[in-house]
Image (cartoon, rainbow, N blue to C red):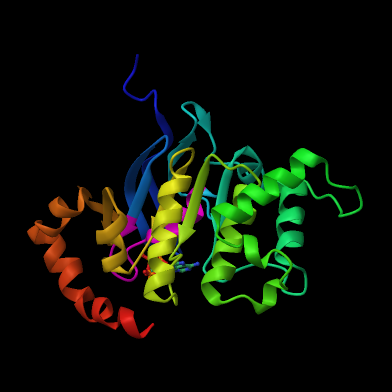
């Protein structure tokens, strides 16, 4: 068996240019099935751009992205990549604020991987159960009939994660999921991500170092569009180059977390 057997997503030598400026320069990233990977690095390191490449929003000038072993998704369109099972969550939640929490999940389930369907058909009992299980997982079972717009910031983020999960992605790409959350919400989100990673793979771009320390097993550090270091949080924290380019610069932001 090849050692790549359990690699679900692989970026090889990915380079992205914006008007001649290389935002990403020969980046490699291999994500294992069921892995929760944190992607960190200073501002402008290219973290968001690499997520944009994976989900098809940005096309690389060179390099390759493969999914589930052999499928080359480098030139696929964004909606095709979503339908294949790579879900992307941006910072701002894209929920329907005037609908209830339950209805939001119902729409997401019917819309599985981008195929839109309306709310007309009655839910089958197994669909109802799937939504209820999802509500429980995201901790919103008591707020199923709340208008989504009335939820707290953290709850809205969880709802959106629940909506994504009902579309059954194999890989989830999350951009700063705990930004603006309270410490309690942040911890709850970390636990939720670990639970999700039992069945799916996740890449999280994150600036909150305390959150990364508490919940990461493997961390990838980017700097100036390149891979700087990959390893456990202990290895990352013990690396002089990382301390120089990243941790040193981020100390202020780290401290500011409690005021977010
Ligand atoms: N559409 C674009 N056109 C031109 N330059 C861009 C574009 N998108 C990103 N860049 C530049 O590419 C570099 C990498 O940006 P990117 O957003 O990927 O970094 P990041 O690591 O996610 O940073 P941050 O942590 O601040 O979000 C930055 O210098 C940014 O200004």
Q: Does 135 sit left or right of 211 as displayed?
A: right
Residue 241 at x, y percent in the picture: 11, 60
Q: Residue furthest front?
A: 142
Residue 97 at x, y percent in the picture: 72, 74
Q: Quadrant of the C terminus?
A: bottom left
Residue 23 at x, y percent in the picture: 38, 61
Q: Is residue 45 magenta?
A: yes
Using the image as rendered, state which of residue 20 and residue 121 is in the foreground: 121
Looking at the image, is 194 positioned above or below residue 149? Answer: above
Does residue 20 appear in the picture of this structure? no
Q: Residue at x 33, y 68 (%)?
A: 207
Q: Quadrant of ligand 1?
A: bottom left
Which portion, as a residue range, is magenta?
Answer: 39-54
Looking at the image, is 26 positioned above or below residue 42? Answer: above
Q: Quadrant of residue 17?
A: bottom left
Using the image as rendered, state which of residue 68 and residue 260 is in the foreground: 260
Q: Residue at x 34, y 18 (%)?
A: 2
Q: Residue at x 28, y 51 (%)?
A: 220
């Amino acid at each position: 068996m090849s050692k790549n057997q359990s690699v679900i997503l692989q970026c090889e030598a990915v380079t992205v240019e914006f008007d001649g400026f290389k935002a990403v320069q020969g980046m490699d990233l291999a994500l294992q099935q069921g892995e929760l990977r944190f992607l960190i690095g200073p501002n402008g390191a290219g973290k968001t751009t690499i997520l944009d490449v994976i989900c098809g929003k940005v096309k690389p000038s060179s390099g390759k992205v493969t999914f589930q072993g052999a499928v080359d998704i480098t030139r696929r369109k964004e909606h095709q990549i979503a339908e294949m099972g790579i879900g992307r969550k941006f910072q701002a939640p894209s929920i329907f604020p005037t609908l209830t929490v339950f209805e939001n999940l119902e729409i997401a389930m019917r819309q599985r991987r981008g195929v839109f369907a309306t709310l007309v058909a009655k839910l089958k009992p197994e669909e109802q159960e799937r939504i209820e299980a999802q509500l429980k997982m995201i901790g919103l079972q008591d707020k199923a009939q709340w208008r989504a717009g009335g939820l707290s910031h953290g709850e809205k983020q969880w709802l959106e994660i629940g909506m994504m999960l009902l579309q059954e992605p194999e890989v989830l790409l999350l951009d700063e999921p705990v930004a603006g959350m309270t410490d309690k919400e942040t911890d709850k989100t970390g636990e939720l991500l670990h639970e999700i990673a039992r069945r799916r793979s996740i890449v999280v771009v994150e600036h909150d170092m305390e959150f990364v320390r508490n919940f990461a097993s493997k961390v990838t550090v980017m700097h100036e569009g390149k891979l700087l270091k990959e390893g456990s949080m202990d290895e990352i924290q013990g690396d002089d180059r990382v301390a120089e380019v990243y941790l040193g610069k981020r100390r202020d932001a780290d401290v500011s977390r409690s005021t977010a």
